[in-house]
Amino acid sequence: MDQFLQQIVNGVSLGSIYALIALGYTMIYGIIKLINFAHGDIYMIGAYIGFAVTTYTNLGFFPALIIAMTGCTVLGVIIEKVAYKPLRNSSRIAVLITAIGVSFFLEYTMMFFVGAEVRSYPSLFTKRAFNFGDIVINMQQIYIVLTAVALMILLQFIVHKTKTGKAMRAVSVDKDAAQLMGINVNTTISFTFAIGSAFAGAAGVLVGIYYNSIDPLMGMMPGLKAFVAAVFGGIGNIPGAMIGGLGIGIMETLVSGYGNSMYRDAAVFALLIIILIVKPTGLLGKNTREKV
Amino acid sequence: MRALTKKNLMILGSILLTFIIVQALLLVGILDSFHEITISTICINIILAVSLNLVTGFTGQLSLGHAGFMSIGAYVCALISMRMMSTQGFLIGVLTGALVAAFIGILIGIPTLRLKGDYLAIATLGMAEIIRVVFLNLEITNGAAGLNGIPRFTNWLWLYFFTVTAVVLINNFIKSSHGRACIAIREDEIAAESMGINTTKYKVIVFAISAFFGGLAGGLYSSYFYFLKPDLFGFMKSVDILVIVVLGGLGSVTGSIIAAILLGLITTFLQSFTAVRMIVYAVLLVLIMIFRPSGIMGSKEINDLFKFRFGKKEERIE
């Protein structure tokens, strides 16, 4: 039982990182129906910015987090303007290939400049741990979960209480109608990329702290898994992405804790296929009727 | 309908001529072993791209898991030919690998092909990842270290034979009434269904054919490069194949062939600039998609481009 609870604790901290990445995926998918494969690499860049800030300037965790988020915001908006905006009216598969191209570009440009080797992240927190019975919760996990929760509350506030958030929701429902209502669709899309990328940047710093190591190709697998999390919760749905992220994180730690950690990734994808077959729109997704 | 029309004879002639020219150049030594690797990669990529194009380009079902089928074919062929070290063993291996891949394709296709668009893409991606993890953990495939010392039977003759066969068979399938049913599914699934096309049946058939040729290409690959490990068939490999298909044009067999040759040459050319190779590749990809989103050929075949000139003649024959 204690081991189970311990795995849940680990799963929640890993899952909140996945949830942060999944939020970006789900928002971008919701607004332009694009699987943004470059999202995982924005998260990688965020991890490297955090690494550079903490190693070379000796700033603490929060300045590093803010700088990484800002850097990723700028990067996300630039990518959207340069690579995706010219393709607004082309086929979806063309945009998908562009996203894959951007993803390769970020990975290998980073590899060109920083090298392919794995770097170890500086430890930013004291090694203090809290014991609840036999369950150990360490400082990093607390910070990770708190940061993730704070960012998610902020996102809920932006999406539901501000005018820009209202515009984002409107554009995701119907782009043309939103434009007719006087909403600047391009600005709204850029804003969505900005928020999504900022979250990915934050997740990058958090994962650097959690796993202690970063490399230029680290974004691939978590990127795919975060997308699975987004689909799991119902793509385009913000609470769904949070639940999906946590679910995937917990499942992964349970599989590595009780089963074979080699099958961790397979379990995630098997879950995805089962979910898609049973409930194709995800846990919280709405069914849309097909019209002829 | 006659099989020996003037057009078919011309195609047959040019196929034979290409074979003889390359074979002669290989024998004389103008094309060395380095070029041979490029040619082999191109041939394997042509089979992969044309078979994926059947699913993604002609039937409109986006698949991100083609490398999974390739890996099945590769491993089955390797395991068989390592136990039967002869040309027969190799041929049995290649065909068994392709059949196993097709069988797995049907098994996976029946549940997942009910999904549409991005959901199908992500389900096929997941399936390929599961196949990869299974190969990573099996005893018989030697896990992450991979299989070494697979006997090499793939040569220019077999490569060319299988490539031509695959392309001709897939092309004939597309030109048949089954192929037209698939194109109808791509254009409008609901309309196709209401015209009496069993969409699920055709999607599964196409998926199985595509998996068959994917497995075939995998078998040729394993026998040519005599080394296999599960990481070779990850998400990146599926993307590589999809890139060829999209660059060539969705729904264009000749487009896939041209793109496979072009990309093969570009990669060989960039080999000497290893550091920036992938960066240049990525930039090219983005630029081509921005300036020509429909790919090199669009959905046209190469002979469509000449139709304009020969148009009148064809009308007279009919």
Image (spheres, coloured by chain):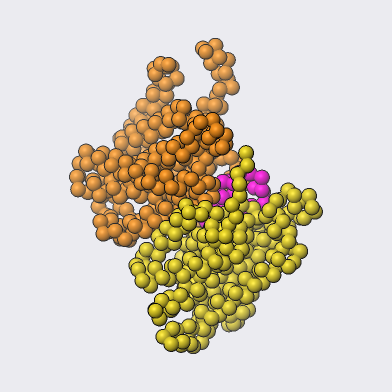
Chain colours: A yellow, B orange
Residue A95 belongs to magenta span = yes
Q: Nearer the viewer, residue B19 or A66?
A: A66
Q: Which residues are magenta?
A: A81-105
Horizontal arrangement in the rendering, residue A80 relative to residue B13 (left or right):
right
Q: Please state the horizontal and vertical placement of residue B245, each as a whole percent of the image.
A: 49, 42
Left or right of A159, for residue B15: left
Residue B34 percent across, percent down from the top left? 36, 45
Q: Which sits in the foreground, B190 or B7? A: B190
| Residue A290 on image: x %, y % | 60, 44
Q: Residue placed at 44% from the left, 67% from the top? A: A251
Where is residue B88? Give x, y as percent: 21, 38
Q: Is residue B242 magenta?
A: no
Picture residue at 37% right of the left edge, 58% below the top: B133
Taking the view exactly as shown, the residue that stands out farthest to the right is: A182
The residue that appears at 56% across and 40% down in the rendered structure is B295
Q: Evaluate whether residue A57 shows in this view.
A: no
Q: Is residue A31 above or below residue B103?
A: below
